[in-house]
Amino acid sequence: MYDFKYQKASSVADAAKVIGGDSEAKLVAGGMTLIPTLKQRLAKPTQLVDLGGIAELKGIKKDGNAIVIGAMTKHVDVANSPEVKSAIPALADLAAHIGDPAVRNRGTIGGSISNNDPAADYPSAVMALNATIVTNKRKIAADDFFKGMFETALGADEIVTAVSFPIPEKAAYMKFPNPASRYAIVGTFVAKTGGNVRVGVTGAGPVVFRWKDAEAALGKSWNADALKSLSVKADGLNSDIHASSEYRAHLVGVMARRAVAKAG
Amino acid sequence: MPSVTLTVNGKKATAEVENRTLLVQLLRENLGLTGTHVGCDTSQCGACVVHVNGVSVKSCTLLAVQAEGADVLTIEGLAKGNDLHPMQAAFRENHGLQCGFCTPGMVMSAVDLANKNKNPSEHEIREWLEGNICRCTGYHNIVKAIKAGAEAMAGGR
């Protein structure tokens, strides 16, 4: 690991000022991706700004017809939250299967979506539930947030402060995990909210995407069989030692059907 | 050089570290607590699991400076003198190890599980061990040990 300066931010404004003035500075939330990246010398930040001490970024609350989760809320706290379990059990279930227990004790929702790993779990839920990403500057719709592999709409001094998830009528997440890392080889989140169906797919492509053919079919008939005749094209999907693009395309359908069955 | 002060196994400790020093390096190299192991060094194997503020974390994936002020419990802090912690005793009783390299992390993870779940099922134990890898053999005796250890902890032994 290359050395760097380190500071604990006392507030979001404080952290934004540092990263706004130094393009080589990096924020650290739970550090579950950043620290392994630093250890492999894949990044060489000048300084790390630790968000761990900012109390205003933590916590879960029900706000009208939405569950609002602070950016520094850990996966374990989402998984165990009575509010999330009762309003959006699919989201608690997703959080309960990220990585392993020690990772869930450190990793955060804000870190996960800001990092935007193509195989991360949360982006699929953000897309399928049509969540709103709240930053220190504005509110960003899910469809506008995830731009590409490890790339988001966040500006240079912009920090995710919370994610607001509208409460769905039905939702479920199914993933085919990598047996070692538990990252999604393919993960599919299906949700029906206010009569609208959205399907978010992670792991399959360079960035999370919506499977619109499945959304249309499930909009007509919320049933796993409604997806049987649909398929996803392998072109442009990820291909690596774990799974070919053809296999991932196949898994998108399988995980989507299982998710619909699980959602009931 | 930054100075980090934290509580380790109930005692205050201060160490001079670099910002890039990992918690596991502070424990092993500054404090000489070599019971916490470094296996994969890529956050997967769990040999380095310790408790930070009461919950299990991978100490190879936490900067020492991030642990400023934290309460850290390592494998050395479990036994009371010559009396093994019930989870350690259960690992011995059930032969829950072969080479022993993964054992400190296994035991620390297991204690965290038993603190949260007094009577974990075999399935829950196996799921919990997703982040702890043993390369000697299967996990059969480790799972048996954790079940027995959790029962002993719940029984106050």
Image (spheres, coloured by chain):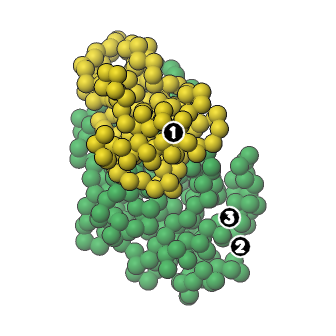
Chain colours: A green, B yellow
- Viewer-side label of 1, 3: 1
Residue A251, label in figure: 3
Which mark identifies residue A231?
A: 2
For image coordinates 50% across by 20% down, the residue present is A2
Alpha-carbon distance for marks 1 and 2? Answer: 50 Å
Mark 2 and mark 3: span between their CA atoms? 10 Å
From this viewpoint, is residue A60 visible?
A: yes
- Decide: few, some or many residues near mark 3? Use Cα within 10 Å; few <14, some 14-19, many ≥20: many
Amino acid type shown at disc 2 = Ser
Mark 1 or 2: in front is 1
Where residue A247 appears, x then y in whole percent?
74, 60
Side of B97 relative to A232 (left or right):
left
Name the amino acid type tagged 3.
Leu
Q: Give the labeled residue for mark 1.
A: B94
Q: Chain of mark 3?
A: A
User: Which disc is residue A174 wearing?
Assistant: none
Tell me, yes or no, whether dots 1 and 3 are on the same chain.
no
The residue type indicated by label 1 comes to Asn
* Residue plotted at (55% across, 77% down): A261
- Front position in the image: B152 or A52: B152
Residue B39 in which image quadrant: top right
Give x and y (percent) for residue A101.
Answer: 44, 46
User: Above or below — where is B147 with respect to B21?
Assistant: below
In the picture, measured across the screen, residue A88 lies left or right of residue A128, that is left
Chain at tag 2: A
Is A230 drawn above or below residue A21 in the view shown?
A: below
Q: Chain of mark 1?
A: B
